[in-house]
Amino acid sequence: MTSPTIGVWNPATEELIGEVPAFTAMQVEQAIARGESAQRSWSRLPIAERQAFLTRIADTVDAHLEELAALESQDVGKPIRAARAEVAGVAACFRYYAGAIDKSHGDTITLDDGISFTFHEPIGVVGVITPWNFPLPIASWNIAPALAAGNAVIVKPASLTPLSTRRLGELIDEISPIHGLFQVVTGGGSSVGAALIDDPRVGKISFTGSTEVGQSILRASADTMKRVTLELGGKSANLVFSDADVQAAAAAAPWAVFDNSGQDCCARSRILVQRPVLDDFIDGFVEATRALSLGDPGAEGTDLGPLVSAEHRSTGEGFLEPGLDYLYRGETPGDPGHWLAPHIVLDPSARSRAAVDEIFGPVAV
């Protein structure tokens, strides 16, 4: 019987570019058991050996930078220049935490009748559930510190963009001193993610994604008293005052909101401008936005790629309500691809969805 798989599609071409296994709950339980065993051995290794392993991961990522960047670009629709920079940041993250391993100490506290000591101990098995917009960077921000602290790590990448994380898992497994120390499990959140959250052997869950899913994870983790780290949605503001360098602010503002085609939980999609400089800012902002190149993510000169899926494009288009005052509406390359060009809306109603809700697409108000 053939095991079920999940298809992975290039959002720029709408072509199938890979398949990954759809793990069952039983397979996740087996991964957790391997992680438990690996963690016990890992935490007993000398600090120097753990530092050497994290440094070797960084060197391996550097050696495979072009391969990982290409996967990230094709998987997410991310411009190749951005993907390269992000993969380089992954290597830097592992190097940083390799250096941090021997700098995490407990405290010695003098009491009236003696001395109290505190120790830092690993949690055990850490489950990491990552989003589709920055697969490798966000995974590394969790994997590296968890390994440095003596834990085993199991990552569940988003089903839309699992290829680069899965390849990172293969590369790390090839050099790992202990089998099962770092594992990647692929599948849906309701099955694979839930299996990680519900298992009492997983001592911590780190999740990056929507506020609604984060709330459900927090509730579910209460039953096993897990430690939980959540990075959820946002509606960040970009503030421009009249004493600012308005030209510099206007030139930088497009990248603050349209980078990664606006698919960023800290995208500054609300731009609040002091009235005396509003016209000058608008002129510069529209001009800088018009200069952005939207197109083939694999081309060196591309600034913005497509949105990650047809469903997500439809969600973004839903914010472009009739009656809005558009300062700028970009042109899309057309089919195939899940394209949504940058849009700039002036002074929408305070109750409009564009003004209130997280858009997660290339729309600025």
Image (spheres, helix red, strand yellow):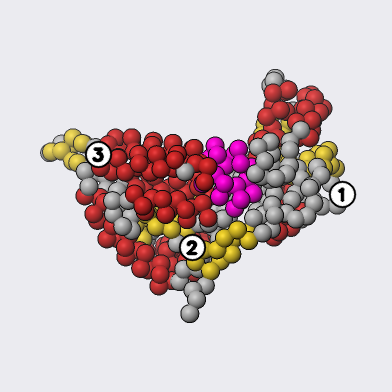
Q: Quarter of the image containing the C terminus?
A: top right
Expressed as whole percent of the image width and height from the top left, the position of residue 12 reads 69, 52
Q: CA distance from mark 2 to mark 1?
A: 43 Å
Can you tell which mark lies on residue 133? none
Is residue 131 left or right of 100 when viewed as pictured? right
User: Residue lying furthest left in this view?
Assistant: 113
The residue that appears at 28% across and 54% down in the rendered structure is: 178
The residue that appears at 41% across and 67% down in the rendered structure is: 28
Is residue 42 left or right of 29 when viewed as pictured? left
**Tag 2 and tag 1, C-beta contact below 8 Å:** no
**Residue 354 inside the magenta-drawn segment:** no
The residue that appears at 51% across and 46% down in the rendered structure is: 68
**Residue 71 inside the magenta-drawn segment:** yes
Which amino acid type is shown beneath numbered disc 2? Thr
Query: Which quadrant of the structure image shows residue 110?
Result: top left
Can you tell which mark lies on residue 186? 2
**Tag 3 and tag 1, C-beta contact below 8 Å:** no
Total number of numbered discs in the rendering: 3
Is residue 115 left or right of 16 when viewed as pictured? left
The residue that appears at 76% across and 45% down in the rendered structure is: 341
Segment colored magenta: 68-86
Which amino acid type is shown beneath numbered disc 1? Gly
Residue at mark 1: 323
Q: Earlier in the sequence, mark 2 or mark 3?
A: 3
Q: Which residue is nearer to you in this view: 213 or 95?
A: 95
Dot 2 crowding, Cα within 10 Å, few <14, some 14–19, many 20+: many
Q: CA distance from mark 3 to mark 1?
A: 63 Å
* Callout in the foreground (3, 1): 3
